Amino acid sequence: MLSSVLDSLRAWPAVRRSALSTLIPSGEGQVARVFDLKAAPALRALGYRIVRGAAEPSAALAVVAAAKPSRRGTTTDDLDFLRTLAAELAPGGFLLLRAPLREREHIAAAFLHVGLSPVSQMASRRSVLTVGPRLAAPFARDEG
């Protein structure tokens, strides 16, 4: 999975600060964990402190930025991927996901399904930036 994320990142241009500033608030000194390295400069310009890899255990993550793996997985794979990322966020923190533009509706539905609401999206060149805040009490997973 990691190699497909890296392949996606090489193909896409960097995220612009102007685009990102319309989706998430500035975060003076707040922590952002970045898997999508092309989002790091824009997040840094908005005042976020960027960490890669594991964040300090005491750090409440205000933003997690990632790119959707380029492979065409199942809906279950996509939901598990988003749940894993969202679990790292503090309540009210934002998940930022960059995905191919053709997957815009699928990604919005997946965000809602894992409890990231309200969803905001913006087309950015060949990709779509999708942002959703983590609810204080995420939806329970339906086991039945």
Image: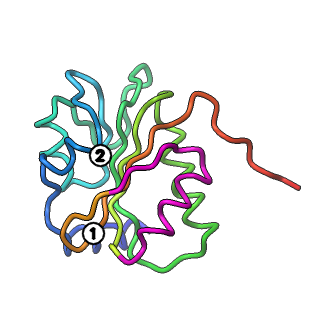
Q: Residues within 10 Å of mark 1 (few under 14, many from 20)?
A: many
Question: Which quadrant of the view contains residue 64?
Answer: top left
Crowding around mark 2 (Cα neighbors within 10 Å: few <14, some 14 to 19, many 20+) is many
Seen at 46% across and 29% down, the residue is: 92
**Picture coordinates of residue 127, whole percent (x, y):** 27, 69
Q: Is residue 96 above or below residue 9?
A: above
Residue 136 as seen in the image, left or right of residue 49 = right
The label on residue 90 is: none
Seen at 20% across and 70% down, the residue is 12
Question: Viewer-proximal residue, 117 or 142?
Answer: 117
Q: Magenta stretch mostly in which secondary structure?
A: helix
Q: Is residue 29 left or right of residue 45?
A: right
**Is 14 on the left or on the right of 84, as rendered?**
left
Q: Which quadrant of the figure contains the N terminus?
A: bottom left
The residues colored magenta run 102-121
User: Which quarter of the image is occupied by the C terminus?
Assistant: bottom right
Q: Which residue is under mark 2?
A: 34
Picture residue at 14% right of the left edge, 45% below the top:
42
Amino acid found under the numbered disc labelled 1: Ser
Question: Does the segment drawn in magenta span residue 78?
Answer: no
Q: Which residue is mark 1?
A: 127
Secondary structure of residue under mark 1: strand
Q: CA distance from mark 2 to mark 1?
A: 17 Å
Q: Secondary structure at mark 2?
A: strand
